[in-house]
Each structure stands twice: as structure tokens, then as C-alpha cells.
Image: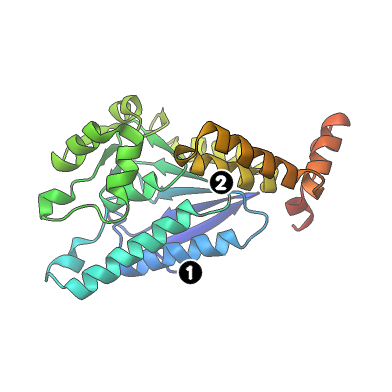
Amino acid sequence: MNKQIVIEHLGHSAIVTIDNPPANAWTLESLQALASAMELLGSEQQVNAVVLTGAGEKFFSAGADLQQFAAGDETLAAQVADAFALAFNSIRHFHGVTVAAVNGYALGGGLECALACDYIVAERGARLGLPEASVGLIPCAGGTKALADRVGVAWAKRIILGGETVDADLALRIGVVEEVVDAGLAKIMAVSLAGKVSRQSRSAVLAARRLIDGSPQSTLDRQLLLEKAAFLELMGGAEQLEGVRAFLEKRQPSWLADDDD
């Protein structure tokens, strides 16, 4: 694995750390390494949840390394944009749950990385924004949609068009992040949240995730049909049988992933 992306396994969770000092900026190589890391974790049956964080105390990620764009090379820019899309889509398409532990600044591609996760925990003192317009660029890794989906069009325009950065408390109020914790605790909280998911049935988590992700485009009647189909598909499966049996026997379930360890 590229040294700028570090994987640590923790039970049925994994921690992926962006480690490119001093600001954990994204390079073509680190983006490709992130995509490879998520693909690897996606192939590991025992991993149900992934926490993404930045090395050090000051930066989750300051975004793209702007040295890549100093010459205005469109070919390189296209490669980097494609790498951003591939890397962050690998987070969005992960079969389990992803949690961003924002420890410091999350700017540009750094915030876009966090927005690709299912939920975000930020430390007090963190600053979040999409300031690309200040250097003559725009977000190119899904930020315009992901931020608008979370906070609405007006706040997305204020942050992107105005180049505003928001602190953790304001980010919580407008819906950029789901939880704010004291300095040094983001990763601990994110691991705790990931651990809750890792104790669930992998097949049920995957089915529910697909339904939730598709729900904004679905009517209630359509969603009911999709839920019934997924419910019946799970019925009679090894994890469903084990889960109900464990509940009735008042014990913790032993999921299939546990047997593969």
C-alpha cells in the first residue's frame, strides 16, 4: 500500500489514515492508493465498517496538492479528477458503513472525502470548506452535490461561492457533520460508531444501506415493495436464522464473518 494511505484493522472495522504531511494533501498517487485500499477492504468479509481520518492533529486533509495544477496541464488535471472520482466513489460504494473522523482542517478534496462517508464526526477546532474558487477552480469530486444534499442549496452556495469555512459547531447546526467532540476524540468516537455497525449482520447492513441510499429517488409505495423484496431475500439465510436464534437464546450472534476469522 502507498505510504500516504495507512490501513489498520480493528476487529470487524478498519481505520484508513491519510498520511501525507504536513497537510495530508491529495496527490494522484494517494488517491489511487485510497481506491485500492477501499477495494481491498471491500473484499475482506470480516470488515463491516471503515473509519477515515488524517494523520496528526491539524489536518484531516487540506485537499488537492496544488503543485499538480501549477502549470495548467489539462491532461494531468483530468487524471487527477478521475482519480478523485474513483477514490471517493470507492468510499460511497463500500458494502458497510464509512465514518469520517475530522481532526482539524477538511478543505476542498479533504471535505469531499468526508462527504463521501456515511457520517462525519468533527473535533472542536476543525474547519470545513470548499475553497476551490479562490484558486480559480471548483470542487470536482462530488462536492457540489454532496454538500447541497446535506445542507441545502443556499448554504452550499454560501460555502462554495463565497469560499467560507465553517467551524465544527456551525457545521453541526447546518448538517455538514453529525457529531462534534472535543479535540483528540474524533477517531475514538468514529471507531465506536463503526463498532456498532460491525456487530450487525453484514447481509442486513448491505441490504439496508442500498435501500437508504436509494430512498430519495423512491416513493413510499415503491420503497415498501423494495423493502419487502429485500426482507424476503434475507429470510431463511444463514445470518437471519442465526440472528433470530441468538435473540431467542439470549446470546450474541455468531455471524458468518466471525467464522471466517
| Residue for point 46% across, 52% down | 92
Residue at far right of view? 249
Q: Secondary structure at mark 1?
A: loop
Q: CA distance from mark 1 to mark 2?
A: 29 Å
The picture places residue 69, in percent across and down from the top left corner, at 17, 66
Tag on residue 19? none
Crowd tier of the residue under label 2, counting other residues whose Cα lies within 10 Å: few below 14, some 14–19, many 20 or above: some
Q: Can I make out residue 200 in this image?
A: no
Residue extending furthest toward the front? 221
Instruction: Write down the residue under mark 1.
Output: 1
Q: Is residue 182 visible?
A: yes
Query: Element type at marker 2?
Result: helix
Q: Classify 160 as above or below 138.
A: above
Of the image marks 1 and 2, the number of the one nearer the N terminus = 1
Q: Tell me residue 205's x, y (percent).
A: 63, 43
Report which quarter residue 185 is drawn in: top left
Q: Is residue 194 left or right of residue 17?
A: right
| Amino acid tagged 1 | Met
Which residue: 23% across, 73% down?
Answer: 76
Q: Is 251 positioned to the left or the right of 105 in the image? A: right
Instruction: Pick whichever, 138 or 193, lies toward us.
Output: 138
Which amino acid, mark 2? Arg
Front: mark 1 or 2: 2
Q: Which residue is mark 2?
A: 210
Looking at the image, residue 236 lies above or below residue 87:
above
Q: Quadrant of the C terminus?
A: bottom right
Q: Residue at x 31, y 45 (%)?
A: 145
